[in-house]
Amino acid sequence: MADLLGIDARTYINKENGLSQFKMNEMFMICKTFKRSLDEIFLPQNFMNHEVEEGGNATTSEG
C-alpha cells in the first residue's frame, strides 16, 4: 500500500495507526484501488452512534 501511495512504509503505518493523517489524494487512491467509497474505508463503523452520543451530551454556556 505504501508503494501504491508513493510513501515510506513507516509513514503508511503511522497513518494507519492514526499517528498522522492521510492526504485527500491518498484517500482517493485507496478508494479507487478497493472500489469503495471514502466513508466505507475512512469513517469508523460506529460513526453515527458516536456522533449521536456526543451531540446528545453536548452543552453550551452562554454568558
Image: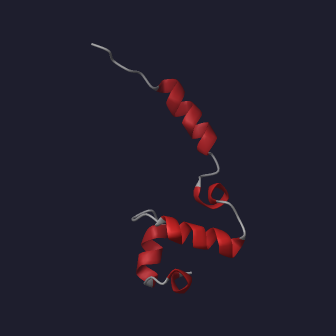
Residue 8 place in picture, x, y as percent: 43, 84
- Identified at 70% across, 72% down, the residue is 34
Residue 32 place in picture, x, y as percent: 66, 72
Q: Which of the two residues, 41 or 35, is positioned nearer the viewer here?
A: 35
**Residue at the left extreme of this rendering:** 63
Quadrant of the drawing holding the N terminus: bottom right
Does residue 12 sit above or below 51 in this rendering?
Answer: below
**Residue at the top extreme of this rendering:** 63
**Residue at the bottom extreme of this rendering:** 3
Q: Which of the two residues, 35 or 50, is positioned nearer the viewer here?
A: 35
Does residue 43 sit above or below 60 in this rendering?
Answer: below
Does residue 47 sit above or below 42 in this rendering?
Answer: above
Q: Residue 47's quadrant in the figure? A: top right
Residue 37 as seen in the image, left or right of residue 7: right
Colour theme: secondary structure
- Identified at 62% across, 38% down, the residue is 49
Does residue 6 sit above or below 43 in this rendering?
Answer: below
- Identified at 50% across, 32% down, the residue is 54
- Identified at 39% across, 64% down, the residue is 19
Residue 6 place in picture, x, y as percent: 48, 84
